[in-house]
Image: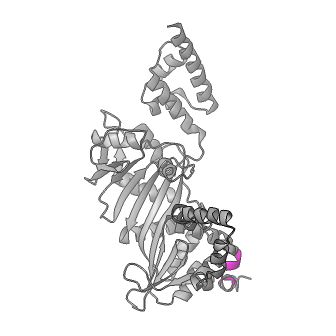
Amino acid sequence: MEEYRINDIEFKEQLRKERLSYGISQGRLAYLSGITKQYLNEIEIGKSHPSDSLKEKLLATLNLFAYDPLLFLLIDYLRIRFPTIDAEETIRNILQIKPDYLLHEDYAFYGYKEQYSYGDITLMASQDDTKGLLLELKGKGCRQLEPFLQAQNRDWYDFLQACISAGGIIKRLDLAVNDVAGLLDIPLLIEKCSNGELLTHSRKWEAMHAGALSSKVKRDRDKGSTLYIGSRSSSQYFCLYQKDKEQKNKHIQTDIKNRFEIRLTDKKAEKAVRDLLETHSPEQVVFTIINRQIRFIACKTDSIDPIWEWFAGKDRKPIELEMRAESYTMERTVEWLKRQAAPSLVTIHRIEEQNGTHLLEYILKQAKLKEAHRIRIRQMTTAVEDMIDTAVLQKENDGIF
């Protein structure tokens, strides 16, 4: 019993010390933790002894205040159709990249016949005027475009405005709210859905735990969880998932714990882009969409869940649209080599060591590179600044003074 009391003494001292270091009042911490201010005060003075689960919750809530900002926004998918069939002009004027650095291939998707690509930046083309051109930036494509935007002294607002000014029609937009603090507890939100604590205009939600999809699932913090709210066939739905665990499965480190994705198509996507350009306020655009559609309530009450309320905008800094620029690398090729070719290469190498032959060296010398290989080499060995179409930049700057 004495050991339990010593632990309680250490806990109450740690709790009070951390709370004061963050400048958090007892009332705010109590509200966010779902207890009364009086009970929290009793814990801090040693009058009440909280359960281990409440201790964990109080410290976890306090830990959220260590992050500033709690959230940031990324554009994580973008698809735009342009009313032209002139791919080279679009590459120069919209992407502002020298066309010679994009790989041309005689196939594409969505009914297009050919495509030009730099990593995951893809421009699909057709000779059909009614189809025009289709620019697709998947998650990595958005990150790979950002080094070019930075080198061009442009941001996402500049890029989107250029697309709209060229007659671009937004076909899809994914906005990713990234939670670096752990504000969103995805398994808990799934549990709240099961308990009827989700208020939404959509009647549909689905949860996925490590590949198992159902509308009613047990809470399991040891597995990566995903929550879909809304129909995935509609023009607007939400996807909430544990980003750190998803990336850990791929052996990738990330500082993002959870992600809330708003996935929009057609008119919904078009409106979101125009609202961003008009307001330059990601906070207003993103959380107007979210707060109109969903909210989570506290257990056995009709009041908004305090942590959800915090996420939704109360008493936190406005979210900003950021860049997380990434270079185009040989990652996929290297992974393929490791999985498919490495064992055979090692086998040949060891045989050659024993027999004194040089077959691998001969194979490499005899290999003939195609134009696609040469372009990929140029893409990965040329500085971003040298791939920028400076003629476009000069034209934009003409006549300023």
Residue 42 position within the rendered picture, expressed as x and y whole percent measured from the top left: 49, 16
What is the total number of numbered labels drawn onto the structure image?
Answer: 0
Q: Is residue 290 visible?
A: yes
Asked whether, in this view, residue 356 is left or right of residue 301, the answer is right
Please name whichever residue, 392 or 246, is drawn nearer the observer in this view of the structure.
246
Residue 219 position within the rendered picture, expressed as x and y whole percent measured from the top left: 35, 38
Q: Is residue 97 visible?
A: no
Q: Quadrant of residue 221?
A: top left
Q: Quadrant of the C terminus?
A: bottom right
- Look at the image and give the residue range highlighted in magenta: 384-390
In percent of the image, x 60 and y 45: which residue is there? 68
Name the outermost residue toward the right: 401
Does residue 386 belong to the magenta stretch?
A: yes
Residue 279 position within the rendered picture, expressed as x and y whole percent measured from the top left: 51, 64
Name the outermost residue toward the top: 2
Position of 178 relative to 346 (above/below)? above
In percent of the image, x 50 and y 68: which residue is there? 278
Residue 392 position within the rendered picture, expressed as x and y whole percent measured from the top left: 65, 84
In percent of the image, x 66 and y 77: which residue is there? 362
Name the outermost residue toward the left: 203
Scheme of colours in the image: one colour
In percent of the image, x 33 and y 34: which residue is there? 299
Position of 257 relative to 94 (above/below)? above
Please name whichever residue, 279 or 185, is drawn nearer the observer in this view of the structure.
185
Position of 309 relative to 339 (above/below)? above
Asked whether, in this view, residue 68 is left or right of residue 397, the answer is left
Position of 46 relative to 208 (above/below)? above
Does residue 366 belong to the magenta stretch?
A: no
The secondary structure that dominates the magenta segment is helix
